[in-house]
Amino acid sequence: MNKKISLGLCISLIIISVTATFAVTMVVSKQIYNGIIGNISQRSQTYDSLEEISGLVNSYYYGSDEDRSRINASLVNGYVEGLGDSNSLYLNAADYAEYTAMLEGGLTGIGVETAYNYQKSSFVITHVYEGSPAEKAGLNALDVITAINNNAVTMSNYNILSEELYGSMLSAVKIEYERDGETKEVEPMRGFSIPGVSGRLESNVGYIKINGFYKNTASEFKETVEKLIEKGAESMIFDVRNTYSGTIEYAAQVIDVIVPAISENIAVAKGKNGENKKVFTAENNSVTMPFVVLVNGSTSGPAELFACDLRDISQAQIVGTRTAGVGTMQELFALEDGGAVLLTVALVVPKGGEAAVYNEKGIEPTVEVSLNAGYTVNLSLLTVEEDNQLSTALNMLAA
């Protein structure tokens, strides 16, 4: 699935960056410095350098430095970026609100999934959620979106324009689309809660796609698993390809739904001094059947913990390509200006112990399968036959 979300929602725990277009005071800047730099001499050196640069700018800079809010914003953003950790971010108040809303309830938008079809140079709706504003407006799967808010969609801008289809604000989005050679326009509202888990039955194999690990994901996952078992599923495929958003804590809750209760921890978050910052356990009843987990190079963070623990606890087979290798835990720290800093605070040690740590090296699949050329991006456009990772998993479970 190639899903684009609003800028605030896009800021996940992994590979992303925040544009410094927000206002923040020097008081907030110092709060960040003081929180990260514990050494007084280092802190003093930082302040001295800033004072020196400020003096040079005041004395020699040809342009204007009157926009202090922009300077201070860039200062704070640059400091966090200077940590060299793409998972540590500064969020302004608006992005902080959107980020926490995403964690609480998952993605929101008009209720569609989309993908860019490079073979046909078209931006296609691949799925319309039942009961969504998109469905009520008459949009269908395979409709080709040609313009969003009067901006023509192209291969170079579809990433940016598609962000308009997502977000929690109850505002309309103008969409121009083509169907059967006819062009139409609709204006569905944003704000629909998009399910983070979807499932279907392939013969007697349950297929479940997890799009992110949010507060409500465990309950959605449990309900989906139970429904597929009722329909006759005798084995399960869990697809976490291109899945990266959410938190380690919520991933542990999803793992707890499916694995047996064990005496050992299913994961431990280790702080920089080796202390246990968080311990995750499995206590619920398990589902006992063969599992396969689909992964790829964009499987990251909480999705990697899910794959790793299912391999080590439930003997799940992992099919696909090596994962991204983001095995750290982040924590949000609220600031006085209404924003927040998202900082990496711990290394995630999965059930398998130190030997199973996947940070910076990824998880190697037990069965390595690469997608055929031309099918590496838009998974939602593929049939089961074209998706050789999925078809491989189905054949393994049918054997």
Image (cartoon, rainbow, N blue to C red):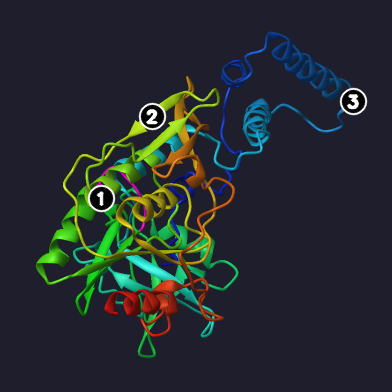
Q: Position of residue 14 (x, y in %)?
A: 52, 47
At x 78%, y 30%, the residue is 64
Residue extending farthest right: 60
Q: Is residue 258 magenta?
A: no
Q: Report, in whole angstroms, how far the alpha carbon at label 3 lies from the one at label 1.
A: 64 Å
Residue that carries the numbered disc 2 in the rendered image:
278
Say which label, 2 or 3, has the lower sequence index: 3
**Among numbered discs 3 and 1, the one appearing first in the sequence:** 3
Residue shown at 29% from the left, 48% from the top: 255
Q: Residue furthest top?
A: 40
Q: Magenta segment, which residues?
A: 211-218
**x and y percent of residue 377 in the render?**
51, 71
* Amino acid tagged 2: Lys
Q: Residues within 10 Å of mark 2 (few under 14, many from 20)?
A: some
Tag of residue 60: 3
Quickly name the residue at label 1: 259
Vertical comparison of 341 with 130: above or below: above
Nearest the camera: 351 or 86? 351
Give the residue type at disc 1: Val
Q: Is residue 71 left or right of residue 28?
A: right
Residue 245 drawn at (x, y percent): 42, 49
Where is residue 239 shown, x and y percent of the image? 36, 64
Q: From the viewer's perspective, is the residue at label 2 or at label 3 nearer?
A: 2
Res 17 visible: yes
